[in-house]
Image (cartoon, rainbow, N blue to C red):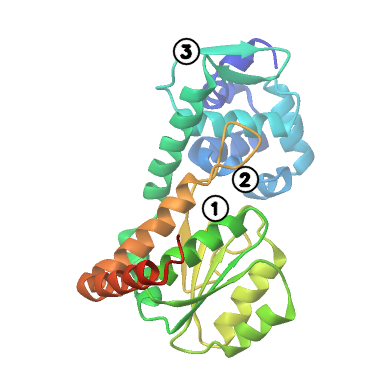
Amino acid sequence: MDEGKSRRVSELLEHGFDGFSRSQKAVARYIIDHLEEIGYLSAEELARKGNTSSSTVVRFAQSLGFAGYPELQKAAREEYRLGASTRPMVHSDQLLFVVEEDFLTRALRTDILSLEETLAKNTLAEFDRAVEILAHAGQLLIVGMHEAASLARHAAYVFELLGVATHVVEDGSEAHHARLLQLGPGDALMAIGFRRAHRLTVLFTEQAATRGVGTVVITDNSLSELAGKGDVTLLTDIDSTFFAHSLVGPLSLIGALAAAVYARDPEMFERRLQDLRRQIDESGWLK
């Protein structure tokens, strides 16, 4: 993209709207009204939203000055995440993306925005429903594959501290399937997965639901294959300015769930924690 690179996607669309064809206007309206979704929609999915073809979407992106649809996606995500209040930017024609003066500020600012977006994407009512499921779980199975595995392990750690019998599923081994078959009403499953989500995470969630297990899904957008599969779906932002996803949002969401469960009966949970710490001290495990 040439001189248009320094302009926001919404500005490009608004400036050229009167000259767009009918199908282009439909796509432009959807992008303007749903800027937060464009980073996750394929050209085919956006085409369906605008009742047109994917080739039209690609050509439309190119007519705006982008090399193709992926570059439009990136610019839309950048605009949505950083808004109009960003620090001055330096534009690199060689790198074909926008970089800020220092990476530390930009990385931390992006994480702050991730937390704000995670808060905005969830209602207190849905959060409370998830807490209700987790607070009454006899057993808790936490499923997370690939990058979500570290989140699953952290969730297991904090819920184990609260005295919940917890198991982590990081692969499709028979032992994990056996644990799933042991669950029933009164137990819970937490499924964590992003973008398209791992097929095993989706499978475990679907099977748990058929067994009457309370299911809590944590994913990043409503188009994820996990979204809507559980009794409760909580959304969290994971976008990063760099090569790996940011996990600040989901980590904070997991922490909030554990804190809310603790708050249901702080005296009981505090006694459990004190007993645990006393046993550790007496055993000398940490020495």
Left or right relative to 174: residue 207: left
Q: Position of residue 148 (x, y in %)?
A: 60, 56
Going by the numbered disc 1, the residue's amino acid type is Asn
Q: Residue at x 59, y 21 (%)?
A: 16
Q: Position of residue 260 (x, y in %)?
A: 30, 64
> Which one is closest to the eye, mark 3 or mark 1?
3
Quickly name the residue at label 3. Answer: 88
Please identify the quadrant where the C terminus is shown.
Answer: bottom left
Decide: few, some or many residues near mark 1? Use Cα within 10 Å; few <14, some 14-19, many ≥20.
many
**Element class at badge 2:** loop
Residue 79 makes an appearance in the image: yes
Q: Position of residue 178 (x, y in %)?
A: 66, 86
Query: Relative to 217, does residue 115 appear above or below in the rendering?
Result: above
Precedes in sequence: disc 1 or disc 2: 2
Residue pushed farthest right? 55
Q: How far apart, in angstroms, are the residues tagged by discs 1 and 2?
A: 8 Å
Decide: few, some or many residues near mark 2? Use Cα within 10 Å; few <14, some 14-19, many ≥20.
some
> Which one is closest to the eye, mark 3 or mark 2?
3
Decide: few, some or many residues near mark 3? Use Cα within 10 Å; few <14, some 14-19, many ≥20.
few
Instruction: Name the quadrant containing residue 207.
Output: bottom right
Instruction: Name the quadrant containing residue 197.
Output: bottom right
Residue 223 makes an appearance in the image: no
Q: Nearer the viewer, residue 240 or 76?
A: 240
Going by the numbered disc 2, the residue's amino acid type is Tyr
Query: Relative to 230, does residue 64 appear above or below in the rendering?
Result: above
Quickly name the residue at label 2. Answer: 40
Going by the numbered disc 3, the residue's amino acid type is Pro
Q: Position of residue 129 (x, y in %)?
A: 36, 71
